[in-house]
Image (tube, grey):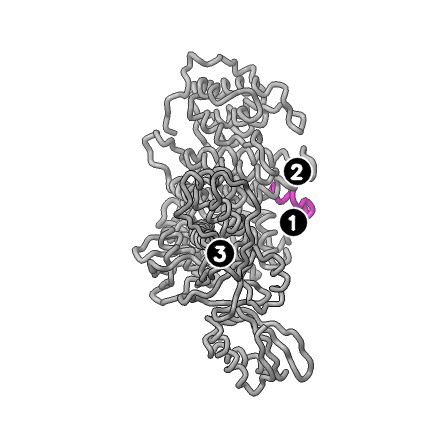
Amino acid sequence: MTSFEPVCSTADLQVVDPATLPAYMLELERAAAYLDDAQRAQLRQAWVVGAAAHSGQMRSSGEPYITHPVAVARILAEQGLDVETLLAAILHDTIEDTALGWDDIASQFGPTVAELVDGVTKLDKLQFRDRQEANAESFRKMLLAMSRDLRVILIKLADRLHNMRTLGAKDPQSRQRIARETLEIYAPIAQRLGMNQIKSELQDLGFRALHPYRHAVLEKRIRAAPMVRREALVQIEANLAQRLTREQIPHRLISRVKSPWSIYTKMRAEAKSFAQVMDVFGYRIVLRTVADCYHALGVVHSVYKPLDARFRDFIAIPKANGYQSLHTVLFGPYGAPIEVQLRTEEMDLVAEKGVAAHWTYKEGGQAPNSAQNRAYNWISGLVESQHATGSSLEFLENVKIDLFPDEVYLFSPKGDILSLPRNAIALDFAYAVHTDVGNTAVAARVDGKLVPLRTRLSNGERVEIITAKSSTPKPQWLEYVVSSKARTAIRHQLKQMGHEDAVQLGHRMLDRALEALGSSLERVSAARLDAYLHEGRHPRLEALLADIALGNKMPSQVAYALARSPGEDAAPAPAHTALTQEKILITGSERGVISFANCCMPLPGDDIMGYHTAGKGIVVHRKECPNVAEYRKSPDRWVSIGWDHTVSGDFSAALRIEVDNRPGALAQVAAAIADAKSNIDRVEYLERDINVAVLRFSIEVKDRRHLANVIRKVRRLSVVLGVQRI
């Protein structure tokens, strides 16, 4: 291990006799035997400071609190982490739970250790609406600290691991909550960072706490596996070892058993019983070189036949967390599949310890290893996306989406490899390349074939994104994408576009209201406008205009307040009905501020009227809609609107169609609608008997003329008895 300057001088240390150390500190010293004498002296000094700070504090189990941070440091020492990380682990709860502050830690152990401690510290001292939001905000802060120093998450994972080991002291409700959080967040993060040892233990402990009975049953079934299977495994191991030795390939052959959590998730995902999960047991072959791995793979395949389509080469294309290995599944005796992994010693170390393998300082002169580089790239992407999220809870949900255990590996036109979550589509790939590419994407080429953006991608495909400057994200995209980066970028862009549309519509609505009073926005003095904005707590005019469009401010009231004389007393704004106002023309593409009522589904060409709804903007109704009579009771909320001549896009409509109830009738109607160039969103039966069926077709059309064309084509069918617009 590379040696580094101590974080504080030996002269500053309080000398602690090792003979006086408690048993838990001796365990830490044994685990940290790779440190030099001066560094171990710093650990003792940190223990003295931490024990004094936590004096009088006890854990739920009744032990002194200091035993917990020392145990966290021991977990990290077993991973071979540097002295700064171990010091921060011993002190990781001091800023949160004691009077010790950042400056105190920095003065004794250096600013880096203080920053690590601060990064792990939760935000319990701040006020949040509920515990869920507090946890989400704490997690957000931790990820930001991770982007500066990856060791923050290593401390947090070790902290969570020791808490899970001692979870029995908690009440049942707390055990369930902590276990669920561990399985949903911390175990996947450990997997994403390649720390397989910690991930497996977190999953096993979380499963045991969340479903104790299921865990106990599975553990018992694994121990009581049929002897015939165990005997077969011994024979398989002997056969593999014999053939590898005969080929003179130096190796370590390790048999392994799947964990209860791994078996449980497979049983649930594939709807299998324990007896049906055949690959409970497997082997790992550790070799010297990459060439030996491929040589050994050939030997293994000569002993037992491989199962088709179950071979994965993670050496040529590593996983996103840096994991490398060859995976193959063999057809063993008694028909049981046997999973075999082949990797080098270096790959085995990275697979088990991930980013903790060969830990290097940023200032240590060595470049971070592959796993660390990949981890930093992943975290940088999360930090970039968190700037665009509206809340900590939304950010946390995006991170959960991003923690998919399975990934697909894809190639860009230049040959770069990009990893995306399972079930990713071409649009996810576009946003993985760059946010601007995703925002302007219109189609994709997968292996040279032109495909829609919703096309699901498979391993090894070459993907090229086609863009157009005029293209913008669609709200429907949120229903298709699976990666957190794509979801966050789309939401951010839609919010931005929605705000711009709201400002423009609000401007037009305020102009109409001011014109009715014989004024205009240009005639309102700057002083009067500034006073009104200050009174309404609007930072600028755009915010007021957006509020008007969204229905939070009535344009007539704002217009009257701006148009009245400076000395004039405030009075109720005169009522201006929609019938007396000049129409505001809409194109239908106004995002977030114009919506179309589901009760009447207006189309371009219909006579329409808008109803101003707080928080929703203008809801458009047909004038013949049955609900209009009720809404007329609030004339101040009606907005006179009409269709702009540039209106375009697809609009929802519904048809009630009566048909002869005979085979093929539904298919004929659907074909006629498609022939009229209309998309079918949904079909449902409203009524059905032996002779007649009544169906509701939800379709998309351009305007009234398009709908009339659809109705004509449907009416011509011999199976159709009647058609009417709903």
Query: In the rendered image, which residue does mark 3 sit on?
Result: 478
Q: Amino acid at mark 1?
A: Leu
For the residue labelled by badge 2, is the local secondary structure a helix, a strand or a loop?
helix
Please give the name of the residue rendered at 61% of the width and 72% of the height, measured from the top-left corner. Answer: 684
Amino acid carrying mark 2 in the image: Ser
Task: Point out the residue furthest to the bottom here.
Answer: 718
Disc 3 residue type (three-letter): Leu
Which range of residues does the magenta coloring cover?
205-223
- Nearer the N terminus, badge 1 or badge 2? 2
* Residue denoted by label 1: 218
Which quadrant of the view contains residue 541? top left
Q: In the structure shown, which secondary structural element does the residue marked by tag 1 occupy?
A: helix
* Residue at x 52% of width, y 13% of height: 17
Q: Position of residue 419 (x, y in %)?
A: 41, 52
Specify the quadrant that holds the C terminus: bottom right
At x 49% / y 67%, what residue is drawn?
A: 651
Magenta-colored stretch includes residue 692: no
Which residue does the numbered mark 2 point to in the structure image? Answer: 174
Q: Vertically, is 711 above or below 60?
A: below
Q: Separation of disc 3 and disc 2 at Cα?
A: 34 Å
| Label 1, residues with CA under 10 Å away: few <14, some 14-19, many ≥20 | some
Name the residue nearer the viewer: 451 or 208: 451
Which one is in front, 276 or 467? 467
Identify which residue, 7 or 603, lies in the foreground: 603
**In the image: residue 72, left or right of residue 292:** right
Circle 3/circle 2 CB separation < 8 Å: no
**Which of the two discs, 3 and 2, labels the residue nearer the N terminus?**
2
Across and down, in percent, residue 487 comes to 47, 52
Q: Is residue 440 above or below residue 128?
A: below
Residue shown at 53% from the left, 51% from the top:
551
